[in-house]
Amino acid sequence: MGTAEPQPRARRTARRRVLPYLLIAPTVLALAAVLGYPLADLVLLSFQDMTRRELFSGTAPPWAGLAHYRSILTDGFFWTVLGRTVLFTVVCVTATMMLSMLVALLMRRVARWVRTVMTGVLVAVWAMPVMVAASIFRWLSDADDGVVNWLLGLLPGLDFGKHNWFENPWQGFAVITGVVVWGTVPFAAVTLHAALLQIPAEWEEAARVDGARGFRLFRHVTFPAVKPSAVLVTSLCAIWDFGVFNQIWLMRGGQPEKDYYLLGVYSFTESFAVNRYSAGAAIAVITVLMLLGGAVVYVRQLVHLGETE
């Protein structure tokens, strides 16, 4: 009788360990069914030499092995595009997190009805399609009738009449960064605001009694409390911004110059504009591997957050 008790307990422990995997199994199977074949076909294509002849005839393309990867990794332009992509991601994520934190802190201090209005506006911006946001920013920065040029022209000593913001890639990327940040701030701000609401009021009251004010209060009390959520949002934004394609493609009218190439645009252009399908697939595979690295960091942060809770 005394040896029968551990068996049900062992079975319950085994069920608890297996249950999470059973719960996520349908999602994993659905993702594998939807993304598995295209991803495997993309990897296979990167090791072949697909041309329009094989594409239209339906014949199997010849095997190229690692030739496309060697060509890409030894091409200086690829490393230029990669560095530009990394810099663009860092700028976008930094701007997004700073603005989102300011908005979240503001939402915490305003009246309830103002907070409700701000939340509604943020949700509306978050729901706005990328095409609509890109059209708005193209109108704002238009060389002929742009609002930005008109406002800057009102300042004394400045003449922005007919100023083309996309003639200089640095200025053009500033506009594109605005589109990306505009679309990402709502998600980040609402998430950070939710994290701020979890901070006990007693913590900040005790810090004020000890003389903490302003930035010191934020640095030593507020930010440490929301740091796990901030790290998660930062990781997720980095993954999104690293793979930006639509904003650049739309802002440049479907014909982006080489100075505006990021990895996503570079891969698409190589595949469908230059018809180097296998080379474009190889660039896409490299991009996916880098994004997977970011996804691993994101998942690890999720696991760490779950353990601390």
Image: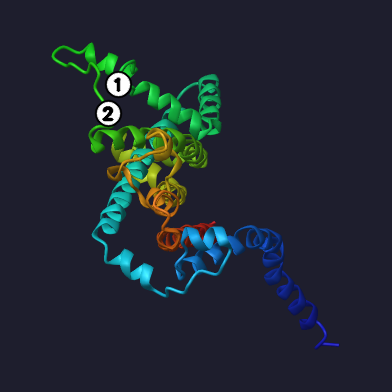
Name the amino acid type tagged 2: Trp
Q: Is residue 204 visible?
A: no
Is 28 rendered above or below residue 200? Answer: below
Residue lying at 46% horizontally and 29% vertically, measured from the top left: 133
Residue name at image x 16 percent, y 12 percent: 156
Residue at the image point whose x is 29% and y is 40% from the top = 216
The x, y position of residue 263, in whole percent, is 37, 52
Q: Which residue is mark 2?
A: 165
Q: Is residue 220 visible?
A: yes
Residue 18: image quadrant is bottom right
Looking at the rendered structure, the secondary structure element under dot 2 is: loop
Q: Nearer the viewer, residue 31 or 124?
A: 31
- The residue indicated by pointer 1 is 143
Marks 2 and 1, Cα distance to the nearest angstrom?
7 Å
Mark 2 in CB contact with mark 1 (< 8 angstroms): yes
Q: In the figure, residue 6 lies in which quadrant?
A: bottom right
| Viewer-closest of 188 and 60 | 60
Amino acid type, label 1: Ala
- Furthest-right residue in this view: 1
Dot 1 alpha-carbon crowd within 10 angstroms: few under 14, some 14 to 19, many 20 or more: some
